[in-house]
Amino acid sequence: MRSLIKILESDVTDELLAKEQHLLDILCAMGRVAVAFSGGVDSSYLLAAAVEALGRENVLAVTADSPLLPPGEMDTARAIAAQLGVRHRLVPFDELTIPEIAANSALRCYYCKRARFGALLDLIAAEWPGAVLVHGENADDHLDYRPGSQAAQELGVRAPLAEAHLTKAEIRALSRRRNLPTWDHPAASCLATRFPYDTPLSAEGLKRVGRAEEAIRAVTGLRQVRVRDHFPLARLEVAAEQVATLAQDPMRTQVVEAVKACGYLFVALDLEGYRMGSMNEGITRA
């Protein structure tokens, strides 16, 4: 990942530092915040910036303990919160009990964010009234289909990174400058994004796709891996420059065996390579 991103200290320009200061000013004006915290690149940087702007005593990290969370993300969230010395609350939340989410329509993300943010807002109202709930949407996220952004806006959940016009690459550069271990972590969207729309979500399917991604990482050493679930077929996405490597033995055979061991019958390698939100292409290209 480091060789792919190639973020250097020289990327942190005066202009970028001015953007970061704008972010700190936005957060400072809120008084105290609760950060919807997944442990990913964006929310980790947002949490660190909030601590700088407001002090630990005015920052709470809140994480939905959800079956949609990719394996290992909860451990990362706990570690980052501990590193920053921030109080961290876990909120048990099972989206599969909500029919509009389990049905997995093109509006799934809207219903999911509305329900999840609603649960976090209820926690804040009960335990930390007056805090502003913020989430890690960045200035690049509008480039993909994200109906969850509308839900956040309707509920008054702020997106300080987007408000400060910070892009993903800029957040990575600033995260590295702060020595956050997440600065070069691959994107880790929720497991529901692995399934075609209108394919109902199930606990079994979510576990299957999560296990398959972990198995591929273990076999290949790759960090950016997506298994798109067209059960019983698994469509694999890796960085375009890694496609040829995965297609050659012995790695090809090892990956096929690992994925089939997770319950799939067929394994396909997407020649287009990994791209964010590939399940949205039928919508965004329509």
Image: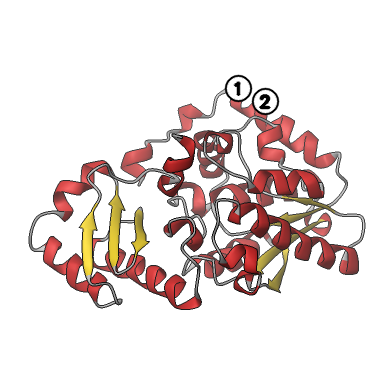
Judge from the rendering whether residue 281 lies leftward or rightward of residue 149; answer left or right. left
Residue at 15% across / 51% down in the picture?
Answer: 245
Q: Position of residue 255 (x, y in %)?
A: 20, 66
On screen, residue 163 versus residue 12, left or right, reads right
Residue name at image x 73 percent, y 48 percent: 152
Q: Position of residue 262 (x, y in %)?
A: 30, 76
How many labels were placed on the picture? 2
Residue drawn at (67%, 33%) of the image: 20
Report the colour scheme. Answer: secondary structure
Cβ–Cβ under 8 Å for marks 1 and 2: yes
Which is more toward the observer, 75 or 243? Answer: 243
Q: Is residue 7 above or below residue 68?
A: above
Q: Amino acid at mark 1?
A: Asp
Residue at 48% in and 41% down: 283
The secondary element bearing badge 2 is classed as: helix
Q: Amino acid type of disc 2? A: Ala
Tell me the distance, in whole angstroms, between the alpha carbons under discs 1 and 2: 6 Å
Q: At numbered mark 1, what does the secondary structure look like: helix, strand or loop?
A: helix
Q: Is residue 128 above or below residue 33?
A: below
Q: Nearer the viewer, residue 235 or 28?
A: 235
Residue at the spot of label 1: 14
Tag shown at residue 264: none
Where residue 128 sits, quadrant-wise, is bottom right
Instruction: Tell me if mark 2 has few (under 14), some (14-19) or many (20+) residues whose alpha carbon lies within 10 angstroms of its own.
Output: few
Residue 135 percent across, percent down from the top left:
69, 49
Residue annotated with mark 2: 18
| Label 1: how many Cα within 10 Å (few below 14, some 14–19, many 20+) | few
